[in-house]
Structures are given as C-alpha cells and as structure tokens.
Amino acid sequence: MKKGLFQPIPMAGCLLLVLAAATPIWAAPEEITPDATCLGCHDGYDKTLTNTAHKLGSAASGAAQPVACISCHSGGSVHADDPSKSNITNPATLSGDQALAACTACHLPHQDLDSYGFSAHTLQKINCTDCHKLHAPSPVVGLLLDDKTEFCGRCHRSASLGFMRRSNHPVLQGAMTCLSCHRFSSRVDQNQAYGFARVCEDCHSDISGPYRYEHPVANAYDVQGGGCIECHDPHGSENDKLLKQPVGSLCRACHAVPRHTTAHDGAYANLDCLTCHTDIHGSAVDYRLLDPNLSVKFGGSCYCHGLN
Amino acid sequence: MLKRTICLAVATTTCLLLLANVSSAANGSASVKLGYTFISDTGSLGVNQETYNAYEGFSLSVQNLRYAFTNGVTVGADLRNVTLNNRNMRAVIGKPGRFSVSFTNSQYRRVYAVDGSAFTRRRQTGFQASYQPNRFFKFFGGYNLNDKQGESALILDHTSDTVITSTDYRQTSYNVGGQIGDRYGVVRIDYRHSLFDDRLSANADRRADRLSIAISSSIPRLKRVFLAGGYTYRKDTALVWESSLRTHELWGALKASFSGGVLAEYRIIYDMTKHVGYLQETDNIAHTFAIGKNWGRSGGVQGGYEQRIADDFTNKTSSNAFIGNVWYRPAQNWYFSARISMRDKSVVEGITLTGIESTVRNRFVVTYADTSWGHIGLQWQSRSRTSDDLDSKIDYQSLSPDLSLKMKRYGRLDVTYSYTTGKFENMSTVAGYEFLDHLLTGTLYLPTWHNLSVDLGGTYYRSRRSQDLEKSRLNFGAMYTVHKEYHLQVRYNVFNYDNFRLNNSYYTGNVVEINFIKDISF
C-alpha cells in the first residue's frame, strides 16, 4: 500500500471515541396499551393496515414483537388517559432522524450506508413516511408511496425538468423511474470515481467494457475520476445523446488537436471527431479508438494510421 | 409475434375475470383500459424524443391492480399496453415476511433515421424471487435479460454524412443470495453473474462476476447507532482478448443519532481496481464525515468533510470537499433550504490529463405554501468546475420558479419555468460552447363538471446560443365518467420540434388516444 493512503484513519478513531462518550438512548420499556384501547377512539384504523406488512398482530415481517399500535405510536398509556396530540408519537410529524430512530426499532435502515458522499435525506425535512405510506386504504406493494418523477421532482426540480429537454432519458414516457438509476442516498458532486458506470451498464451494456484499449475518461475506476457522466448529462441535454456539449467541442475539453486541422491539406478539418474515432468508449483493435474500417469508409488506404 | 401478444392479452384478461369471480370480499381493485392510438406525423422521425416509443393500434392495459387474499398474500400489477410494442409490465405477488415473486417486461424503441427505418429496440425482461422461511433467514435470486437489436446512427455534425451502425446483442444475468439476521443486524451475501453476447462481433463478448458481502447492525441497547460494512469483488472479462478488470472494494460506515437531534455519519471506502491488459492499477480511498443537528421539523443544519485519494502507482491525486446544508421552516407555510459543496483536487505525484480541478455546487430553495390556494416556489442551482491544467472551465446556472394554484371553482393550475445557462470554455478557445435554455411547462386541471373532467397543458422548450432549437408539446385530455366506474377518455397530444440551423430537422406529430376504462373491485 502506498504511503499516506490511510492517513485520515485517526479521524475515524476520534469519531469512535466521541461515540463512546455519547449518551446512549436506552430503550425504556413502555406500559403495553392494547390495540383495542386505541381502536376504541380511532375506529377503522386497523383496516388501513390489514393488507400491509404492518397488519396488527402480525409478526411475520421480522419483528421480534407482533405489530401493535404502540410499535409506531409510543406514549399510548399516557395518551389513553389524556387524549392529546402532544403526548403521542406520530412518525409523520417527526424529523428525519427521529423518524429513522422510530422505524428502525424493527427495520434496519436503508442500505444507503454503503454509498459514497453525504446523505442529506435523513437530515432534511423529509422522513420515512414521506416515501412510505403506512396506513393504506388499498394494498400498496412495498408501501412505497410513489417512485415517479413528480414525487422526487418536488425537491429535485432541475433534474426533473431535464427530462423535458431535447435529449432525455424516457422517464416522463414511463419507461423508467428515478429509482432505475438512483438509490436513496445522495453524493456530493458528479465527479465521483466510483460506481456510476456500473449503474449505466445495466441498460447500456454494449459500451461498458472492459476493452483492450480504453478511453480513460469513460472509466469510473480511473485515477482521474471520470465515468459516463463526464460527457453525458443523464437527466437531459440540449445536445443529442445526452451529451453536455456537441461532439466537436466536447472532445476539445481535454484534447488539443492542432494536427487534425492541417493533415491532408485540411481536407478533414471539419469532420466530426466520431467520423474517424467511432469506438469512442473503447476499442478492441486500435489504441486511438479509430474505426477499424476507416480505409473502406474513405475509399483509400490509411497506412499512416496503421489501417490498410 | 402477434400470436404471442394476443395470447398474453387473453391470458391477462382471463386472470382478471377469474379473480373477479372467485372473490367476493372487496379487498382488491384495478383499472382495465382498452383503447386505440392514432398517430399522424411529418418531418424527421429521428429528432423527437416523446414519440420514439409510440405505436398506432389497439392497446390493452391493466393498471394499478392491487389484490389482497385473506391469508396475507398480496398481488400488484401494472400492465401497460400489453398488445403494443411499447408494452411496459410489472407484476408482483408476495406475502410480507414470507415470499415475493416479481416480474418485469418492457420494450423501448429509439428512432435514428428521418423516415424511421433505422431504429433500435431494447427488450428487458426480469424475474426476482425471495423466500423467507422464518424471520432470521431470507433467500433470493433472479434473472434478467437485456436484448437490443436494430440500427443506430453515431452522432455526427451536420456537415458530415450519417453513418449507420448495426446493433445486435443480448445480456443475460442471474443473481442468487441469502440474508441472515434479525432486527439487530443483517449479513447479506449476493452473487451476480452476467454474460454479454454480441451477435455481430465476438470481440465484444464478455462476462462479469460479482460477489458482495454486506453487514449492517444496530448496537443492542444503543439503538441509535448503526454500523455497516462490506466487501465486493468484481471481475469483468473480455472473452476474446482476455482483458479483465478486477475490483476489490471494502467499505465501512457509521451513523449515530444523539440526544438533541444531533446526527453524525462517517464512511470509508477503499477500492482497488486492476485492468489486466490495459496495464493499469488504481487505488481509491474516500473518507466522509458529516455532523448535523435537527430542530424537530422546523430546521436543521449539517456540515461535512470528504477526502479522496486516487493512486495509480505513477500518478496520485487528492481532493478535499466540504459541504454545508441548512434548512429552515419558520412557519408552517415557509420553507428555506440552502446547500453548498466545494471540492478541490490536486495532483500529488506525477501528471494527470485533467490535473488540478476545483468544483463548486450551490442550491437554494424557498417555498411558500398555503393549503387554501397552493404554493409558490423558487429554486436556484449553480455548478462550476475549473481545470487549471487544462485551461478549461464550466459554469452552469439554473433558476426555476414554480407556481401551483388551486381554487374550487376554477380547478388547479401548475406552472413551472426554468431558465438555464451554461458556458464551457474548452482547451481551444474556438471550440467553446454556450447554451441558454428556457423551459416552460404547465397544466390546468378544470373542476369536474357533470362527470366530465378536463385538463389542458403544454411544454415549451427553447435552447439558444450555440444551439438554436425549439421544442413544444400541447396536450388536451378529457374523461367522462358514468356510474363512477366506467370512463371514456380522450387524449390529444401535439409535438413539435425545430432545429433552426438545419432546414430538414423538424418534426410535427399528432397523437390521439381514445380509451375506455373500467374500474373493477374484487
């Protein structure tokens, strides 16, 4: 291992010390309030849970205790004696982290901890119930309230409007949803050296590699970052194929190409880069990512380029 | 093909009717839609996105099917356009905590040629199943097929000739795994294998194998501390050239809630990737630490730091990132949110192509909502990236106000406008690029009048500067309801696209859908 790679680990140690010193939240046993007591006033609420994993009395969903009203709404005994909104827990009105703590009494949190960057969702105003509907009048698969663009787009407006631009992923046409690409967590910026290409290749498997000759920018594992989103804007673009710039100027973000304008007396100076560099994502035969049939395309021998 | 489609449609309808007959309790519902789609268009079929996957003909859809058996088994399905080539179907049957079986099938066409003769069609079929014998164990597995055929065009400048290339491949993958755990923790093991078969060139054939192990745990009696970690091994192999990409990834994470609404997070990821054949090996490591505090649902603040190091033995880069995130709700009507993140990347050893970079992203949101009339909001975003070594710069700004008005007498109006501008200063000054986009979209939902509900809407998009494009859509919908469960629906959409720099690059399409919808309850 290279020197210096693990230097920040002491930071993790400090964090663990902080945690050890933190005041633990002990699980205080609560006096059991029978569901019948709750339903005496909140008549009919049991029916909204009948077709869900939270059916009252159910233990099949993995919980150690059968599901009861007080599983989510703690404070039942006090509330029964003095019915008031202030002395009963309603997960829908909790902050993100408080709701997370309430729900994770039975459920493990989302596997978003394995992602990279910062997770803002749990600290923002939203909580679990913003996406998961618990009291459902009809059976809801997975209790997921909605995974469509309109739902995520309320906060991520710029991304959702991107699907209306000239070139876009077919989300508004119903062919895919936000969750087709995104997990629950967020990342700090787009220049992430991990993972993005792996998301894209589920559908665009023909260009995912590995190749014998790689275009380094296409590699999410490369030392300089990179990945599909270096050139493509996945939500929408004014350019074709979701490109951030038209091909000619996009390539010139990294490549200076002075000789191209003078070679062959400038005959090919106005060609698009992809006219010759067809295997732009990677090539099995040429390190310059040139079209293996370039000589056929131009009706002559391209022996200077090693393509006869 | 037609025979198979008809069989599928008949089978779906039969299943629905059987479900309706065998059940007497009202614990399920669905909407069955039978309709016809007319399409009339002119211009280049290769330029408009919305109608790529639209087909003329009879359509049968079963939407929002939800059914619950008395033994706890639930069925859900969305089967759209079963009889057409743009079908998109999802179905799931399961019992929470016991088993789940899901099925998906969809097709998507992308047109490239002016006359529609060159297009690709992607077919995706998936199947996933899980079984949970008790609350401690869970087994799962699935199969996916991704098949794409057709002809596509490379992106070419309008001064060049269009080059058409053929596509014909199939990617199959399966996954199996298991999970052991209870409410205090879970160990999950997942193996995935995929095989890519290019029918046109064996050079592209490859396989991928991935094994991942993940552990999540909450600490007993310290219920607000979550620990997680895992290991992933992945190997991608090009079968003909014996070129492979191998990745070992280790990660760990901790999330802790403290009293007073304080939340702390830490993550570490170590990733080692080796490209055999391309002779490259890269080590990446990233640490992220964030701490925040919430004041109930009235506000919160978060600050964080991230460090990334990437090393390929010759070159080494390091980056430091900071994030600030704050939201505030002073009253029930108002909501403010602001977020700033910045990253500076430096080259520690060697020389890299992109070199030193700095990235800044900001976002600000303000919303005022009133339950009596709707809401009004404004969102501003900016992104910039400067590469000193490349002498290139990207500057992106977006401003999006939106308005939603609802009045019992006049219905509801949703309007959103977006102004976006971007400037790319590339290596060569003559090859810079700028865009300026205006996007206006809105829908008016009129109040229901004598069982007739009507909506009118449209989207207008204009891109200026280096591009000169215009794109618009107008939509009109009406639905007449009889006896609460029978609906006659008419939808009319007009699409228009113009590229003012290319005379022959335009499109106008009229799509009319007439549907008969029956809501059914089981």
Image: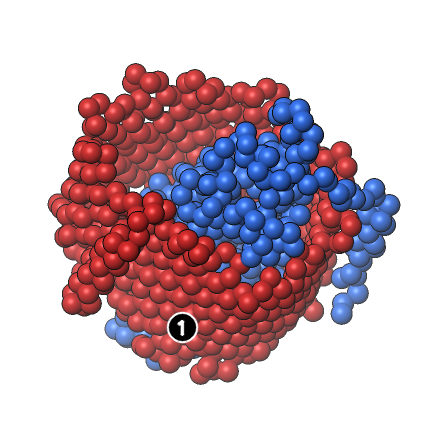
Chain colours: A blue, B red
On screen, residue A55 versus residue B66, left or right, reads: right
- Where residue B439 sits in the image (x, y, percent)? 36, 33
Q: For the image shown, how many numbered marks are present on the structure?
A: 1
Secondary structure of residue under mark 1: strand
Question: Is residue A279 in view?
Answer: no
Instruction: Answer with the quarter of the image where residue A285 lies.
Output: bottom left
On screen, residue B96 versus residue B44, left or right, reads: right
**Which of B513/B394 is in front?**
B513
Quadrant of the image for the N terminus of chain B?
A: bottom left
- Where residue B386 sits in the image (x, y, percent)? 59, 44
Mark 1, other Cα within 10 Å: few <14 / some 14–19 / many ≥20: some
Query: Residue flagged by tag 1: what amino acid is it?
Result: Thr
On screen, residue A248 versus residue B34, left or right, reads: right
Identify the subunit bearing mark 1. Answer: B
Question: Is residue B123 in view?
Answer: yes
Q: Is residue A122 above or below residue B274?
A: above
On screen, residue B368 versus residue B270, left or right, reads: left
Say which residue appears at 20% left-offset and 38% top-offset: B487
Instruction: Answer with the quarter of the image where residue B304 lies.
Output: top right
Q: Is residue A115 above or below residue B359?
A: below
Say which residue appears at 64% left-offset and 29% top-offset: A80
Say which residue appears at 36% left-offset and 27% top-offset: B414
Instruction: Give the residue number, with chain letter if any, for mark 1.
Output: B172
- Where residue A216 sits in the image (x, y, percent)? 53, 64
**Which of A297/B441 is in front?**
B441
**Which of B209/A55 is in front?**
A55
Say which residue appears at 60% left-offset and 57% top-offset: A62
Q: Is residue B383 above or below residue A176?
A: above
